[in-house]
Amino acid sequence: TTFETILVETRGRVGLITLNRPGQLNALNDQLIAELNQALDVFEADEGIGAIVVTGSEKAFAAGADIKEMQAKTYMEAYKGDFIASWDRISRARKPVIAAVAGFALGGGCELAMSCDLILAADTAKFGQPEIKLGIMPGAGGTQRLIRAVGKSKAMELCLTGRLMDAEEAERAGLVARIVPAAELLDDALKTAETIASMSLTAAMMTKDCVNRAHETTLAEGIRYERRTFHAMFATHDQKEGMAAFTEKRRPRFRNA
Ligand code: HXC
């Protein structure tokens, strides 16, 4: 498949997707989201892929939804076309997805990063939900995911003023897992993804499913869900192999089964 708005590569067991609309700071238009979803479908179906990295350019992960594409939309077009529904695909990925963010991650760009399982930030990263300045508000999960990541006051301030937050503040607030020097961002993200991909994919999929469940349910239900999933792991080859390898002081050979 050839794509026009993203670059897609395989690096070992890692699928790499690079958002690529350099003239528009990777503004997210319908075509880009459709291509991103297609690439995710391919990587998810590929037995050889154990983790996925989504990144942008040095200057921008993504500067938001494409304002010029949205500008003339009517309510009926937004409603009938179920505008934004297709943005959900990435949050439904079953394999782990890392967002590697350098430069601007604004509006829909910040929301896309938050839809991934974890965010690695370059020291140049800037996060924000500046939609209010356009007379709108976040529409791809920003009002819901940001508060869960950084708490109410900071989420409210960012959404109501449009202020941007730098990488330091984002890390302090818990939005990003780690900050790395910009020049090392991609290598670090690929290395982190490769580490994840070297584990049992079955275990990684079940783990991310359980961690993500925490945002969708009560603590008691989440604990029950975790426990049932944990029990299920004893039916896997990889649990037997992982524990045998530990006992025999050797490296495990996971089969993702
Ligand atoms: C369309 C965009 C864009 C966007 C940048 N561009 N962001 N086009 N949609 N979101 C385009 C510019 O129009 C310009 O094109 C080119 O990219 C370079 O941008 P500049 O503004 O010249 O760059 P700079 O001066 O460095 O400023 C960078 C910036 C600024 C601060 C990030 O571009 C900016 O404020 N962008 C918009 C950020 C934003 O409001 N995002 C939220 C969007 S709403 P030309 O042709 O002029 O060279 C949203 C809603 C999500 O995301 C809801 C769910 C979908």
Image (spheres, grey):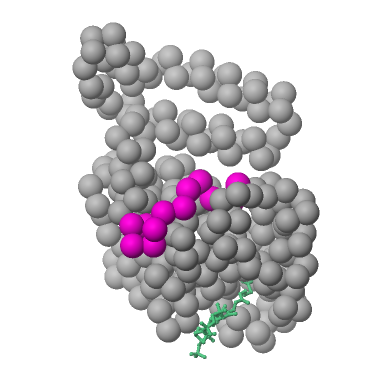
Q: Quadrant of the N terminus?
A: bottom left
Q: Does the magenta stretch include residue 170?
A: no
Comparing 16 with 32, the one in front is 16
Number of marks present in the image shown: 0
Q: Classify residue 242 by image quadrant.
A: top left
Q: Residue at x 57, y 63 (%)?
A: 166
Between 98 and 74, the one nearer to me in the picture = 98
Q: Position of residue 64 (x, y in %)?
A: 57, 72
Q: In this view, does 12 lie to the left or right of 62?
A: left
Q: Residue at x 45, y 19 (%)?
A: 233
Q: Is residue 55 above or below residue 72?
A: above
Q: Is residue 177 rendered magenta in the image?
A: yes
Which residue is found at the position 70% from the left and 35% from the top? 217
Residue 102 horizontal side relative to residue 145, left or right: left
Q: Quadrant of the C terminus?
A: top left
Q: Residue placed at 51% from the left, 75% from the top?
A: 27
Q: Which portion, as a residue range, is magenta?
A: 174-186
Residue 16 position, x and y percent, is 33, 56
Q: Is 133 rendered above or below residue 90?
A: below
Q: Is residue 23 left or right of residue 175?
A: left
The quadrant holding residue 127 is: bottom right
- Using the image, determine if residue 100 lies above or below residue 34: above
**Residue 187, image x, y percentages:** 30, 54
Residue 80 in sight here: no
Residue 146 visible (yes or no): yes
Q: Where is residue 102 in the image (x, y as percent from the top left)?
A: 45, 64
Where's ligand 1: which quadrant?
Answer: bottom right
